[in-house]
Image: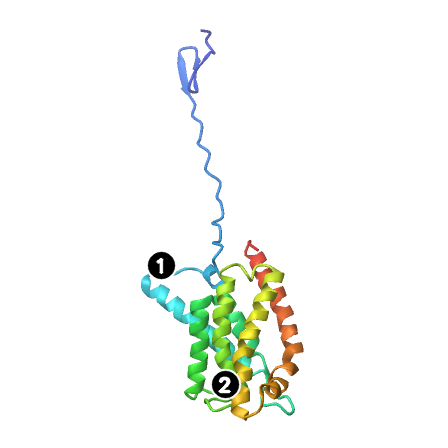
Amino acid sequence: MSENDADPAGVSRIGSSVITTTTEPEEPMATATPIPSTAVLADLLPRATTRFGAQARELALVLGGAALTGAAAQLSLPVPGSPVPVTGQTFAALLVGTALGTRRGVASLSLYLLAGMAGLPWFAGGTAGWTMPTLGYLVGFVLAAGLTGALARRGADRSALRTAGAMVLGNLAIYAVGVPYLAASLHVPLAKAADLGLYPYLVGDGLKLLLATAALPLTWKLVGRR
Protein backbone atom coordinates (compact mmCIF):
# COMPACT_ATOMS: atom_id res chain seq x y z
CA MET A 1 0.00 0.00 0.00
CA SER A 2 1.38 3.41 -0.87
CA GLU A 3 1.72 6.25 1.62
CA ASN A 4 -1.39 7.97 0.36
CA ASP A 5 -3.57 4.87 0.04
CA ALA A 6 -7.04 5.00 1.58
CA ASP A 7 -8.49 2.27 3.77
CA PRO A 8 -12.20 1.44 3.69
CA ALA A 9 -14.70 3.26 5.92
CA GLY A 10 -13.27 6.69 5.22
CA VAL A 11 -9.79 6.12 6.81
CA SER A 12 -6.85 7.66 4.89
CA ARG A 13 -3.19 7.03 5.61
CA ILE A 14 -0.57 9.68 4.82
CA GLY A 15 2.79 8.41 5.76
CA SER A 16 2.54 7.14 9.31
CA SER A 17 -0.45 9.36 10.14
CA VAL A 18 -4.01 8.22 10.06
CA ILE A 19 -6.78 10.65 9.17
CA THR A 20 -10.33 9.55 9.83
CA THR A 21 -13.17 11.19 7.91
CA THR A 22 -16.84 10.82 8.67
CA THR A 23 -19.85 11.48 6.54
CA GLU A 24 -22.70 13.46 8.12
CA PRO A 25 -25.99 11.56 7.87
CA GLU A 26 -28.55 13.30 5.71
CA GLU A 27 -31.45 14.73 7.62
CA PRO A 28 -34.84 13.49 6.41
CA MET A 29 -36.79 15.99 4.39
CA ALA A 30 -39.70 17.51 6.24
CA THR A 31 -43.01 16.46 4.81
CA ALA A 32 -46.34 18.18 5.32
CA THR A 33 -48.87 16.33 7.40
CA PRO A 34 -51.68 15.28 5.07
CA ILE A 35 -55.11 16.68 5.81
CA PRO A 36 -57.61 13.89 6.53
CA SER A 37 -60.27 13.47 3.87
CA THR A 38 -62.95 13.79 6.58
CA ALA A 39 -61.65 17.12 7.88
CA VAL A 40 -63.68 20.32 7.78
CA LEU A 41 -62.20 23.79 7.80
CA ALA A 42 -62.55 24.19 11.58
CA ASP A 43 -60.38 21.11 12.07
CA LEU A 44 -57.44 22.98 10.54
CA LEU A 45 -57.30 25.45 13.42
CA PRO A 46 -54.50 24.86 15.97
CA ARG A 47 -55.37 22.10 18.39
CA ALA A 48 -55.29 22.56 22.16
CA THR A 49 -52.76 20.58 24.16
CA THR A 50 -54.96 20.07 27.22
CA ARG A 51 -58.43 18.69 27.74
CA PHE A 52 -59.67 22.02 29.10
CA GLY A 53 -58.17 23.83 26.13
CA ALA A 54 -59.85 21.43 23.72
CA GLN A 55 -63.23 21.95 25.38
CA ALA A 56 -62.75 25.72 25.32
CA ARG A 57 -61.87 25.53 21.63
CA GLU A 58 -65.03 23.57 20.82
CA LEU A 59 -67.17 25.99 22.83
CA ALA A 60 -65.60 28.98 21.09
CA LEU A 61 -66.37 27.48 17.68
CA VAL A 62 -70.01 26.85 18.60
CA LEU A 63 -70.46 30.31 20.10
CA GLY A 64 -68.69 31.91 17.16
CA GLY A 65 -70.97 30.19 14.66
CA ALA A 66 -74.07 31.31 16.52
CA ALA A 67 -72.76 34.86 16.82
CA LEU A 68 -71.90 34.98 13.11
CA THR A 69 -75.43 33.88 12.21
CA GLY A 70 -76.91 36.46 14.58
CA ALA A 71 -74.78 39.21 13.09
CA ALA A 72 -75.68 38.19 9.54
CA ALA A 73 -79.37 38.24 10.48
CA GLN A 74 -79.11 41.97 11.06
CA LEU A 75 -78.50 42.39 7.33
CA SER A 76 -82.23 42.35 6.71
CA LEU A 77 -84.36 43.79 3.93
CA PRO A 78 -88.16 43.54 3.99
CA VAL A 79 -89.96 42.06 1.00
CA PRO A 80 -93.22 43.85 0.15
CA GLY A 81 -96.21 41.61 0.72
CA SER A 82 -94.24 38.88 2.52
CA PRO A 83 -93.44 38.34 6.20
CA VAL A 84 -90.12 36.76 5.19
CA PRO A 85 -87.28 39.28 4.86
CA VAL A 86 -84.12 38.86 2.82
CA THR A 87 -81.28 38.36 5.30
CA GLY A 88 -77.72 37.16 5.49
CA GLN A 89 -78.51 34.52 8.08
CA THR A 90 -79.32 31.78 5.57
CA PHE A 91 -75.90 32.12 3.99
CA ALA A 92 -74.26 32.24 7.42
CA ALA A 93 -76.08 29.12 8.60
CA LEU A 94 -74.93 27.15 5.57
CA LEU A 95 -71.34 28.35 5.96
CA VAL A 96 -71.33 27.54 9.67
CA GLY A 97 -72.52 24.01 9.02
CA THR A 98 -70.00 23.47 6.25
CA ALA A 99 -67.04 24.95 8.12
CA LEU A 100 -67.74 23.40 11.53
CA GLY A 101 -69.06 19.98 10.58
CA THR A 102 -72.26 18.25 11.64
CA ARG A 103 -71.89 18.15 15.42
CA ARG A 104 -70.58 21.67 15.93
CA GLY A 105 -72.84 23.10 13.21
CA VAL A 106 -76.00 21.65 14.74
CA ALA A 107 -74.94 22.80 18.20
CA SER A 108 -74.20 26.31 16.92
CA LEU A 109 -77.47 26.78 15.05
CA SER A 110 -79.44 25.18 17.89
CA LEU A 111 -77.90 27.72 20.23
CA TYR A 112 -78.85 30.50 17.84
CA LEU A 113 -82.42 29.22 17.66
CA LEU A 114 -82.96 28.56 21.37
CA ALA A 115 -81.31 31.78 22.55
CA GLY A 116 -83.45 33.82 20.16
CA MET A 117 -86.61 32.02 21.25
CA ALA A 118 -85.66 32.77 24.87
CA GLY A 119 -85.46 36.49 24.14
CA LEU A 120 -82.01 37.29 22.81
CA PRO A 121 -82.71 39.82 20.03
CA TRP A 122 -80.53 38.44 17.28
CA PHE A 123 -83.09 37.13 14.81
CA ALA A 124 -83.67 39.14 11.63
CA GLY A 125 -83.92 42.85 12.33
CA GLY A 126 -83.11 42.45 16.03
CA THR A 127 -86.22 40.43 16.85
CA ALA A 128 -86.67 37.50 19.24
CA GLY A 129 -89.35 35.07 20.34
CA TRP A 130 -91.10 32.03 18.97
CA THR A 131 -94.46 33.26 17.66
CA MET A 132 -93.29 34.64 14.33
CA PRO A 133 -94.45 32.84 11.16
CA THR A 134 -90.82 32.57 10.00
CA LEU A 135 -89.76 30.33 12.89
CA GLY A 136 -89.80 27.31 10.60
CA TYR A 137 -86.92 28.74 8.58
CA LEU A 138 -84.87 29.03 11.77
CA VAL A 139 -85.58 25.41 12.62
CA GLY A 140 -84.56 24.57 9.07
CA PHE A 141 -81.19 26.22 9.70
CA VAL A 142 -80.40 23.51 12.24
CA LEU A 143 -81.22 20.76 9.75
CA ALA A 144 -79.30 22.52 6.98
CA ALA A 145 -76.23 22.91 9.18
CA GLY A 146 -76.30 19.21 9.99
CA LEU A 147 -76.72 18.27 6.34
CA THR A 148 -74.02 20.54 4.93
CA GLY A 149 -71.70 19.57 7.76
CA ALA A 150 -72.13 15.89 6.94
CA LEU A 151 -71.50 16.57 3.26
CA ALA A 152 -68.41 18.64 4.08
CA ARG A 153 -67.05 15.65 6.04
CA ARG A 154 -67.21 13.82 2.73
CA GLY A 155 -65.32 16.52 0.85
CA ALA A 156 -68.33 18.33 -0.60
CA ASP A 157 -66.79 21.77 -0.02
CA ARG A 158 -63.51 21.08 -1.83
CA SER A 159 -64.68 21.54 -5.40
CA ALA A 160 -67.03 24.06 -7.00
CA LEU A 161 -69.52 21.50 -8.28
CA ARG A 162 -69.83 19.60 -5.03
CA THR A 163 -70.05 22.84 -3.04
CA ALA A 164 -72.92 23.97 -5.24
CA GLY A 165 -74.71 20.67 -4.64
CA ALA A 166 -74.25 20.95 -0.87
CA MET A 167 -75.59 24.51 -0.83
CA VAL A 168 -78.64 23.53 -2.90
CA LEU A 169 -79.45 20.65 -0.55
CA GLY A 170 -78.97 22.91 2.46
CA ASN A 171 -81.38 25.48 1.04
CA LEU A 172 -83.91 22.74 0.29
CA ALA A 173 -83.75 21.61 3.92
CA ILE A 174 -84.51 25.16 5.08
CA TYR A 175 -87.47 25.56 2.74
CA ALA A 176 -88.75 22.06 3.53
CA VAL A 177 -89.44 23.24 7.08
CA GLY A 178 -89.92 26.96 6.57
CA VAL A 179 -92.59 26.97 3.85
CA PRO A 180 -94.98 24.45 5.48
CA TYR A 181 -94.58 26.23 8.82
CA LEU A 182 -95.34 29.54 7.13
CA ALA A 183 -98.48 28.05 5.58
CA ALA A 184 -99.66 26.71 8.94
CA SER A 185 -98.93 29.99 10.75
CA LEU A 186 -100.73 32.15 8.19
CA HIS A 187 -103.51 29.63 7.55
CA VAL A 188 -102.90 29.70 3.82
CA PRO A 189 -102.45 26.88 1.27
CA LEU A 190 -98.97 25.56 0.71
CA ALA A 191 -98.91 27.05 -2.80
CA LYS A 192 -99.64 30.48 -1.39
CA ALA A 193 -96.92 30.04 1.22
CA ALA A 194 -94.48 29.21 -1.57
CA ASP A 195 -95.46 32.44 -3.32
CA LEU A 196 -94.74 34.32 -0.10
CA GLY A 197 -91.71 32.50 1.23
CA LEU A 198 -89.96 30.62 -1.57
CA TYR A 199 -90.12 31.94 -5.11
CA PRO A 200 -89.12 35.58 -4.36
CA TYR A 201 -85.87 34.39 -2.79
CA LEU A 202 -84.52 32.00 -5.39
CA VAL A 203 -82.46 34.62 -7.22
CA GLY A 204 -80.81 35.71 -3.98
CA ASP A 205 -80.17 32.09 -3.05
CA GLY A 206 -78.49 31.60 -6.40
CA LEU A 207 -76.15 34.52 -5.76
CA LYS A 208 -75.25 33.16 -2.32
CA LEU A 209 -74.62 29.78 -3.89
CA LEU A 210 -72.18 31.31 -6.37
CA LEU A 211 -70.37 33.09 -3.56
CA ALA A 212 -70.03 29.90 -1.52
CA THR A 213 -68.99 27.95 -4.61
CA ALA A 214 -66.11 30.36 -5.11
CA ALA A 215 -65.11 30.90 -1.47
CA LEU A 216 -65.01 27.40 0.01
CA PRO A 217 -62.93 25.57 -2.62
CA LEU A 218 -60.59 28.57 -2.76
CA THR A 219 -60.07 28.35 0.99
CA TRP A 220 -59.15 24.67 0.69
CA LYS A 221 -56.80 25.48 -2.17
CA LEU A 222 -55.04 28.06 -0.01
CA VAL A 223 -54.47 25.53 2.76
CA GLY A 224 -52.99 23.09 0.30
CA ARG A 225 -55.76 20.64 -0.48
CA ARG A 226 -58.79 20.65 -2.74
Q: Residue furthest left?
A: 51
User: Looking at numbered disc 2 in the image, what kind of residue is underneath it?
Assistant: Leu
Q: What colour scheme governs how the chains and residues are painted in the rendered image of this protein?
A: rainbow
The residue located at (44%, 74%) in the rendering is: 108
Asked whether 28 or 22 is in front, the reply is: 28
Tell me if residue 82 can be seen. yes
Residue 137, given in percent of the width and then of the height, sits at: 52, 81
* Residue 209 percent location from the top left of the image: 62, 70
Q: Nearer the viewer, mark 1 or mark 2?
A: 2
Within 10 Å of disc 1 (Cα), the crowding (few <14, some 14-19, many 20+) is few
Which residue is depicted at the point 44% across and 72% down? Answer: 106
| Residue at mark 1 | 49
SS for callout 1: loop
- Numbered tag placed on residue 135 in the rendering: 2
Residue 88 falls in image quadrant: bottom right
189 shown above or below 59 = below
Where does the N terminus fall, quadrant-wise?
top left
Question: Which amino acid lies under the numbered mark 1 shown in the image of this protein?
Answer: Thr
One can see residue 133 in this view: no
Of the numbered discs 1 and 2, the one sitting upstream in the chain is 1
Tell which of 62 and 52 is nearer to you. Answer: 62
